[in-house]
Amino acid sequence: MAFIRLSAAVSASLLVAASASSSFVGYIVTSEQVELNGQSLAVYTLAARFDGSSDTVWRGFNLTADNHDWFLGFWHKDNHGDEATNGLLSQDFGTWNPSRTGGNLANRPYDSYLTIGGIARASNTTQSMGAWFDGDKHSPRAWDQAALPMSPSFNWYVDESSAVLLSDEIEQGRVGNSPGLPLTDVRLGQFVLSEGHEARTFSLSIVYSSGYSLSDDEQDHYSTASGTFTLGNPVPAPGALALAVLGAHAARRRRR
């Protein structure tokens, strides 16, 4: 199944955390445009950026937005469990489970998923916990659905025991363990929307530590950070747009 990659890393934004923190810098959103079978898509990668060499993310939670519709309309192309629709590009069915995305070329470039570090592949250790709502009703399918969770109590995480199983050096949520991203960043998710969609701004909190020791007595303390990120380019308010136009006119007059 052929695809056309139109552009790579066409935009990036840095949003500083809303709460002060010693090592969390902010959320980074990078984007690219792709096309599959005539469908133009905007693919966003969300990452948390840090300034330490061993900062490690353990949990994402309290994902909220002002607009109910911003939790809908995501594209998936994964192995969500229905043999009749597995692997199909769809906004109606899918999973946010990164271990069930499928092929790194046939699926991953077009699939929406949540993760704590790493990438979407079978060995990804990210798990989900908490309430997941489909509309106003609790869904027993957890993250095996196309919409984002409409409940701030939902969270996705990596179990602390994975640091013991995988060893301290290769903990999935540690900086440097998100292939394709800068060594300062930890991947938190990929979000695929139709090209030309309305900009969507979300709030998100994370739990992280400045490192991990296999000895509980030496384990660094946990910190919580919160901030916002935007998928797409927000349209400036009319007043801001008018000021920008006036500023441009003033600059031209000065050059003359």
Image (cartoon, rainbow, N blue to C red):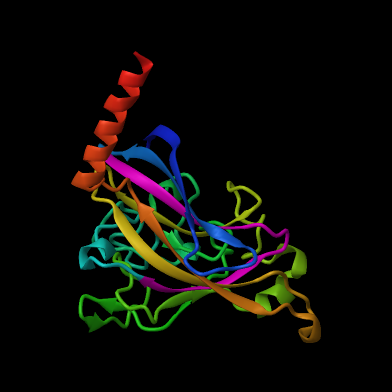
Q: Is residue 107 above or below residue 146?
A: above
Q: For residue 222, what is the image quadrant?
A: bottom right
Q: Indicate the quadrant containing the C terminus: top left, top right, bottom left or bottom right.
A: top left
Residue 78 position in % (x across, y down): 39, 58
Question: Quick check: 234 left or right of 185?
Answer: left
Q: Indicate the quadrant containing the N terminus: top left, top right, bottom left or bottom right.
A: top left
Q: Which one is nearer the viewer's eye here, 45 or 128? A: 45
Residue 217 position in % (x across, y down): 80, 86
Q: Main secondary structure of the magenta part?
A: strand
Question: Quick check: 239 left or right of 19?
Answer: left
User: At 37% from the left edge and 54% from the top edge, which residue is drawn?
Assistant: 230
Residue that lies at the very extreme toward the top in this rendered image = 256
Query: Does residue 107 appear anywhere in the picture?
Result: no
**Is 58 one of the magenta-colored residues?**
yes
User: At 50% from the left edge and 64% from the top edge, which residue is drawn?
Assistant: 115
Q: Is residue 108 above or below residue 213?
A: above
Residue that lies at the very extreme toward the bottom in this rendered image = 217
User: At 66% from the left edge and 63% from the top edge, which residue is drawn?
Assistant: 174
Query: Does residue 185 appear anywhere in the picture?
Result: yes
Q: For residue 170, what is the image quadrant?
A: bottom right
